[in-house]
C-alpha cells in the first residue's frame, strides 16, 4: 500500500501504528505510585487500576527525558515510553530508587506489546469500545484479551497485551482492511497533528510547557524532579518558546535549520515532511514573541532562505484559518 493510501486511511477510516522500539517498563511494589508521583509531572495519588495517565519525566532543570502513558494495572504500572527511549528511562528511574523504597522496575517488553489505532473508525474496528478517554477496558477479539484505551493526544486508541496475541490482533485487523502505517505515513500524520516525538521535539534542550505537554502536568501536586523550574516558568510566565506548525513555501529543509524573522534567529525546525493535503509542512520551536499563527518567518537552509508561515497545532483543515 502506498504512503498516501495509508495516510488516507488514518484520516478517513482506520489505520494501525506499531513501533518495535516502544519502551514497556513495569513499575512494581507497594510504593510504585508514590515513586512515580515524585519522579514525574502528573498526579498519581488517586490512580486506580484501569486508569491511563500521560506524564513527563524531567531532569532537575525541568528538561524533557520522555513523555509516557502510564497504565495502572492490578499490581503494577506499565509505562509505555517513546520508541528508543526505554533503556535510558529505565536506567534513570533505577538511579532514584532509595534504600527504603518498595519499588522494582523491569523491562516488560517480553510481557507487553502495543499497537495504536488511528482514524474515525478506529473504535468501530475494536468492536465499538472504548469510549471514555484515559480509562482502559478489557476487550476480547479473535480469542485474545487486551486492554484498550482512548487517549486525546495523540488522538488514537492504544491497545496493549501479550506480544503473541497483539501480533495476532494486528494480522486480524489487516485482514479486515485496516492497513498498517509505515514510518513515512506516520511521520506525515503525526506532524499534521502536532505530535512531538522523542529525539526530535522532545529533548533535554526543551521543557514540557514549550513542547505543548501542559495537559500532562499537575500544578497542584507536590514536589517532583524538575517541579520548581516548571512551576516558576508557569507562575511567572517565563516560557520562552512554543512548538508551532509551519507552512513551507518550497522544499523540505533539514531538521535543525534556523528559523529567522526581522533579521534575528527566533528558533529552529525540528521536523518537516510533504503532506498530501498541505504540501511542505514542519514543526519548530519559536520564540514566544513571534509565536503567532499567520506570522511570516524564514527557514535558513544552507545559503538559502525558505519563506514559511506559522500556524497553531494541529494544522487547521482549512489553511486559511492558520
Image (cartoon, rainbow, N blue to C red):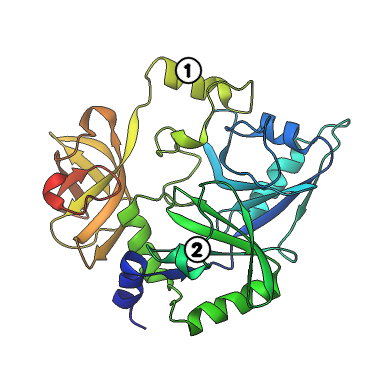
Callout 1: few (<14), some (14-19), or many (20+) C-alpha neighbours within 10 Å?
Answer: few
Q: Position of residue 28 (x, y in %)?
A: 80, 45
Residue designated by label 1: 232
Q: Position of residue 283 (x, y in %)?
A: 31, 49
Quadrant of res 4: bottom left
Label 1 vs 2, first from the N-terminus: 2
**Could you tell me if residue 307 is visible in this image?**
no
Quadrant of res 162: bottom right
Residue extending furthest toward the front:
128
* Viewer-nearest of discs 1 and 2: 2
Q: Is residue 220 left or right of residue 290?
A: right
Q: Secondary structure at mark 1?
A: helix
Is residue 202 shown above or below 47? below
Label ID, residue 151: none
Is residue 25 shown above or below 46? below
**Could you tell me if residue 275 is visible in this image?**
yes
Q: In percent of the image, x 84 and y 33: which residue is there? A: 101
Depth check: give the residue in front, 215 or 134: 134
**Quadrant of the image for the C terminus?**
top left
Q: Secondary structure at mark 2?
A: loop
Depth check: give the residue in front, 129 or 196: 129
Quadrant of res 104: top right
Q: In percent of the image, x 68 and y 73: which residue is there? A: 144
Residue designated by label 2: 128
Is residue 205 shown above or below 201? above
Callout 2: few (<14), some (14-19), or many (20+) C-alpha neighbours within 10 Å?
Answer: few
Instruction: Estimate the spatial distance between the alpha carbons at disc 1 and disc 2, rounded to whole Å.
Output: 43 Å
Q: Position of residue 182 (x, y in %)?
A: 43, 73
Amino acid at each position: 500500500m502506498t504512503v498516501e493510501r495509508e495516510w488516507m486511511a488514518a484520516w478517513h477510516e482506520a489505520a494501525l501504528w506499531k513501533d518495535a522500539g516502544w519502551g514497556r517498563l513495569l513499575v512494581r511494589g507497594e510504593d510504585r505510585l508514590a515513586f512515580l508521583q515524585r519522579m514525574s509531572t502528573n498526579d498519581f495519588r488517586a490512580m486506580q487500576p484501569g486508569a491511563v495517565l500521560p506524564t513527563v519525566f524531567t531532569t532537575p532543570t525541568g528538561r524533557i527525558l520522555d513523555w509516557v502513558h502510564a497504565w495502572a494495572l492490578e499490581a503494577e504500572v506499565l509505562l509505555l515510553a517513546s520508541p528508543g527511549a526505554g533503556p535510558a528511562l529505565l536506567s534513570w528511574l533505577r538511579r532514584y530508587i532509595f534504600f527504603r523504597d518498595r519499588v522494582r522496575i523491569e523491562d516488560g517488553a517480553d510481557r507487553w506489546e502495543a499497537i495504536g489505532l488511528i482514524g474515525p473508525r478506529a473504535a468501530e474496528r475494536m468492536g465499538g469500545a472504548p469510549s471514555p478517554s484515559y480509562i482502559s477496558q478489557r476487550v476480547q477479539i479473535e480469542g485474545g484479551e487486551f486492554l484498550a484505551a482512548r487517549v486525546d493526544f495523540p488522538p488514537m486508541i492504544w491497545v496493549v497485551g501479550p506480544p503473541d496475541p497483539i501480533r495476532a490482533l494486528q494480522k486480524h485487523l489487516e485482514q479486515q482492511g485496516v492497513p498498517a502505517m509505515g514510518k513515512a505515513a506516520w511521520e506525515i500524520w503525526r506532524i499534521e497533528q502536532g505530535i512531538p516525538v522523542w529525539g526530535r521535539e522532545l529533548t533535554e534542550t526543551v521543557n514540557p510547557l514549550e513542547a505543548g505537554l501542559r495537559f500532562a502536568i499537575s500544578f497542584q501536586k507536590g514536589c517532583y524532579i524538575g517541579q520548581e523550574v516548571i512551576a516558576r516558568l508557569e507562575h511567572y510566565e517565563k516560557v520562552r518558546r512554543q512548538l508551532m506548525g509551519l507552512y513551507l513555501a518550497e522544499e523540505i529543509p533539514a531538521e535543525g535549520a534556523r528559523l529567522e524573522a526581522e533579521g534575528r534567529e527566533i528558533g529552529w525546525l525540528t521536523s518537516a515532511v510533504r503532506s498530501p493535503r498541505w504540501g511542505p509542512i514542519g514543526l519548530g520551536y519559536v520564540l514566544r514573541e513571534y509565536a503567532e499563527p499567520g506570522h511570516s518567518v524564514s527557514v535558513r537552509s544552507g545559503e538559502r532562505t525558505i519563506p514559511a508561515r506559522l500556524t497553531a497545532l494541529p494544522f487547521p483543515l482549512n489553511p486559511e484559518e492558520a
